[in-house]
Amino acid sequence: MTERPKKLTAATVVRTSRPTPHLIRLVLGGAELTGLPVGAYTDHYVKIVFPPAGVTYPHPTDLATVKREFPAEQWPRLRAYTVRAWDAAAGELTVEVVHHGEEGLAGPWAAALRPGDRVLFTGPGGAYAPDPTADWHLLAGDESALPAIAAALERLPAGAPARVFVEVAGPADELPLNGAGAVELRWLHRAGRPAGAALVEAVRALEFPPGRVHAFVHGEAGAVKELRRLLRVERGVPAGDLSISGYWRRGLDDEGWRSTKRAWNAEVEAEEAAATPA
């Protein structure tokens, strides 16, 4: 199978800000963003490209060319981030990066960025936007899903019922979320508990409104697994009405999670099939 070329887009940091203690907002601009195909989905994402120290790739290029012409130790690491906003008139793309001090790859990188710095990314991709014909919406996730949840709320039709659950470390990590829907929002504070525990409890305790739900559930993989079983098996939500995936997995870095995700998904699907009545 031929690898589909993934163009590397070069952008420039316009400005950065810290809307919460654990979130860094990056606004990117530049001529290569003109006509960026963003708008169909509320979970559009780009994959930021991190070359190894001292390695520079020719530009323009794509990932297939990089992997063909550079030795494996010089291939980049990638991190996916949701597009929080796209201002086509200004040519500005906003993404938000979770930051936990010096932990991880992207957080320290984002904290060190300054206006004028260069950023490479591929994309955008995406698949979800709130279905305006649904009777109600369920949006649930942690900090990693917060940009997509915020974008989805801004897309909801006026008066559309939505139950929203967002798990964060504490009160300082809450953000204003806006939209025209009839939104019931619960911020869940982790307060030292394992990631996803409060989220699973809250969604499990929800009394589902009548009618067809369109759900968006993303975050830590272990919690997502439990919520997927709840929605698919116990609540009978059809797969077509559910966008659900583990954005990350506790105890693994991004490369480790991506290398095991396919097998993990297959295991989850097999467990669901065994638990679903014929």
Image (spheres, rainbow, N blue to C red):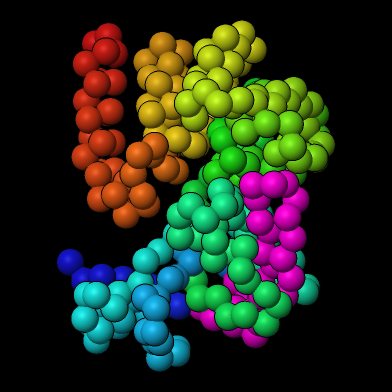
* Residue found 56% across the figure and 33% down from its top: 141
Q: In which quarter of the view is residue 149 placed?
A: top right
Q: Which secondary structure type mostly characterizes the magenta part of the structure?
A: strand
Q: Give whichever of 88, 19 is nearer the camera.
A: 19
The answer to whether any part of residue 209 appears in the image is yes
Relative to 102, 221 lies left or right: left
Which is nearer the eye, 181 or 201? 201
Residue 213: percent from left, percent from top? 57, 23
Looking at the figure, which quarter contains the N terminus? Answer: bottom left
Q: Is residue 40 visible?
A: no
Q: Residue at x 44, y 43 (%)?
A: 247
The location of residue 8, given as percent across then percent down, is: 45, 78
Q: Which residues fall within the magenta stretch? A: 9-36
Residue shown at 77% from the left, 74% from the top: 90
Going by the image, does 220 lie left or right of 30? left
- Residue with the most extreme left position: 1
